[in-house]
Image: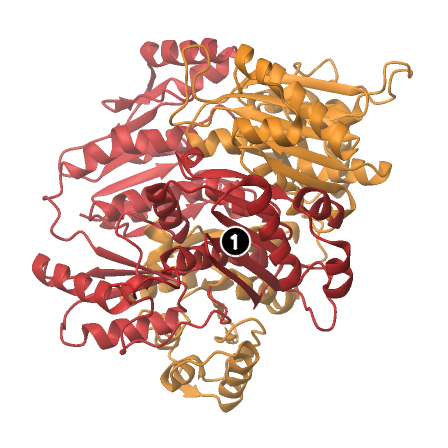
Chain colours: A red, B orange
Amino acid sequence: MLVSVISVGNELLNGDTLNTNLAYLGERLADAGVPLHRETCVPDDREAIRAALSHALIDSAAVITIGGLGPTTDDLTRTVVAETLGLALHEDPDVAAAIRAYLARCAVSIPPEAIRLQSLVPAAAQVLPNPNGTAPGLCCQRPGQATVIMLPGPPAEFRPMVDDAVLPRLLQAVPPSLQRPRVVRVAGLAESRVEACVQATLLPLPGLQVAYCAKPGCVTVRLSDPCHRADLLDTAATRLRQAFAALALPPDCLTPADHVAQLLQARGWYLAAAESCTGGLVAAAATDIPGSSAWFAGALVTYSNEWKQTLLGVRQQTLDAHGAVSEAVVREMLAGLRARFGVRAAIAISGIAGPAGATPDKPVGTVCVGVCADAVTTVTRLQFPGNRHSVRERATAMAFVLLRTALLQPPASCPPPVVPLTPSPCCPEPRHVQPVQ
Amino acid sequence: MLVSVISVGNELLNGDTLNTNLAYLGERLADAGVPLHRETCVPDDREAIRAALSHALIDSAAVITIGGLGPTTDDLTRTVVAETLGLALHEDPDVAAAIRAYLARCAVSIPPEAIRLQSLVPAAAQVLPNPNGTAPGLCCQRPGQATVIMLPGPPAEFRPMVDDAVLPRLLQAVPPSLQRPRVVRVAGLAESRVEACVQATLLPLPGLQVAYCAKPGCVTVRLSDPCHRADLLDTAATRLRQAFAALALPPDCLTPADHVAQLLQARGWYLAAAESCTGGLVAAAATDIPGSSAWFAGALVTYSNEWKQTLLGVRQQTLDAHGAVSEAVVREMLAGLRARFGVRAAIAISGIAGPAGATPDKPVGTVCVGVCADAVTTVTRLQFPGNRHSVRERATAMAFVLLRTALLQPPASCPPPVVPLTPSPCCPEPRHVQPVQ
């Protein structure tokens, strides 16, 4: 079944808004074995919406429009879809009542005309309730023709409607999914090295489709098979996991941070972080995971040297001798976290995110990342490419990659682990200095 | 000039990757008065890329492809574009040398075939250097036909190439921009109230196009005029700024946080933050602004009650009597920040981001936000809709909105400000309890 998306909104094309809705819907559909076929993003323009819809109706079984259902004059989706499908719009008193009830719950009032516009429903369309906003979703199902589903753009409204109303409808039409892709996520290895390892490992299993996606600290490998051979997919995924060994994340972890959370919680350990150039991003990534209070103690964003000294006990002489961005200072930050907060796991980061602050021997992108997992402490000086945003994002990701490695490392006195920490011989060695994307 | 974009990559359609490149390019083009006409996102599939390109070539003066230039087998853009335009590919030794030099700088090696693939250039194409990665950009300019520009997908490579190579090329063809839109950003008012105020204010100036974009804490109003009447646009923007009064951000501020940074720096004040449910997002938003060390002292992510007590001096009896999510605890967090770190501005947040942690009188989305600007302290209990991500994002945005308001508030002993803090009578009053999107 081909599903395509039309995203509507000037704000998506002029840089005001990131299209997080597309990523959310795309992930849900990919997981269900119905990968999105195409997305078209158009401005709040009657003709552009109409052209994109007409084009999508030609080759899609279902078209999902996102946005343009709100109360302002540039919200055109409802009208254009109804016109294009030849359906009259009528005011639905139940929808108007639901909007008024929602507004009352939020103690907000909006002009009556804004309520009227959002209660317009195309003939024979099903109304998809929106418990988190005013405009409901609208589903136009027509026998023998493409289904058109309209959803509001605000993510807090859009996401629950995808899960509660859209997926159940779409998946009715899909067979229980043998074609669901198998996914292996690899931590801390560059994309080209992941591919070399995948190719060496899967060479004896021809006919599989492999797609790669590199994010900071993690490469996702997706295996699919046009012939729906579930056994072959399972075998391939198992072989990849064996080849990548401990570099492969457990299947229920989407990121190295997810795995860190799992490892810490299993041991009953707490993590604390001290951040300079990442300025809260490590803490934000940790607390983005629901239930993080079971393993995340807290973080200190010690942006100034004074805070590093007061809160973490970093010594003036260390700052003078090595500078704030140095392995020595990061070691003292780690020691301060452990001594003052009694945690068994810690992350400390100090670096130059730019654009200012560079010196000849410490260019923009120089970041010292320290991690500590009980007896194992490592401090690594890394050099990241890119701008401020990129350096901060990559440093944050690498902190979790390195902490994960430290957590998997056996204490010196223990026998070697059953699962080796490097990939099998067919795969190249990971090198921490490379710019993992 | 119509410019369209083709984003290539399974990862954009399956939710692995947010299309931040589109937002970046779209903003740059909108600011230059050449708003993007359309974007199409297709998977790593030969036929899908070909179809999107053929479609874009019909109605665009320039087509920019993003992604699919890398070294792995699912990188198809270069080949498909060359085929579609009827251009042969040849290995460019200068490109290969540049790739080797880049790899040497990063101390990384990749397979020789990966270098060869990325050094293929279509006949007569210009090579756009990529100082931050391996694959260069490629520009195919053909007399009388649409220009096709191919750019690599990693944002750290893509962004500098947009600024250094793409914009100068595209803007050569555009007249000095009378059609550049005028932008007014309004802090802390719901979108429908912003629109009501805009309509009341601009009623005497017909013919203008108005577009709205609501983000947490800020609504952007863009004014454009199909007839390019620069004077009319300037008059309209000035009237809007007068109507919104202090709710309008200064023209050089994109967000309430930008304005907070400006206000603090002008006064020589420092900001410190204490975060619970936002878990580092306030600090991350502050330190996302280049030069933040001039006004941002640091932050404490006091996720546990123990940290709130140890680091901020929150009293056990206050926690017992009111719970961690309460105005009383937030007041003590603010007081702790000011007393212990000597800052004149502070933000403190405690809330329930969910999915767990709700109680009957404190549902998910309950957040207490406290701000302090010298003598002015306000603590507000807010109720945000949506999931964990949404609650955290909105709470962070509102913290800067509220701090901005506090910073603009005159001390009690001063005469009233020249610019009133509420919008003019034609506009409705802002209400902090409403769910600002």
In the rendered image, the vertical position of residue A32 relative to residue B17, given as above or below: above
B93 horizontally vs B161: left or right: left
Please state the chain letter of the residue tagged with numbered disc 1 in the rendered image.
A
In the rendered image, the vertical position of residue A20 relative to residue B1, given as above or below: above
Q: Which residue is tagged 1? A: A396
- Between A317 and A203, the residue placed more toward the observer is A317
B414 horizontally vs A98: left or right: right
> Helix, strand or loop at disc 1?
helix
B125 horizontally vs A218: left or right: right
Q: Position of residue A108 (x, y in %)?
A: 53, 12
- Between A148 and B300, the residue placed more toward the observer is B300
Q: Position of residue B375 (x, y in %)?
A: 81, 20
Give residue A115's quadrant in the image: top left
In the rendered image, the vertical position of residue B349 relative to residue A11, given as above or below: above
**Residue situated furthest bottom in the rendering:** B93
Q: Residues within 10 Å of mark 1 (few under 14, many from 20)?
A: many
Labels in figure, total: 1
Give residue B187's quadrant in the image: top right
In the rendered image, the vertical position of residue B136 relative to residue B275, given as above or below: below
Give residue B334's quadrant in the image: top right
- Between A227 and A9, the residue placed more toward the observer is A227
Residue ID at (55%, 79%) = B102
Q: Is residue B69 visible?
A: yes
Q: Is residue B423 visible?
A: no
Amino acid under disc 1: Thr
Residue ID at (42%, 47%) = A41
Q: Position of residue A132 (x, y in %)?
A: 40, 22
**Residue situated furthest front in the rendering:** A413
Q: Position of residue A379 (x, y in %)?
A: 55, 62
Residue ID at (73%, 60%) = A318
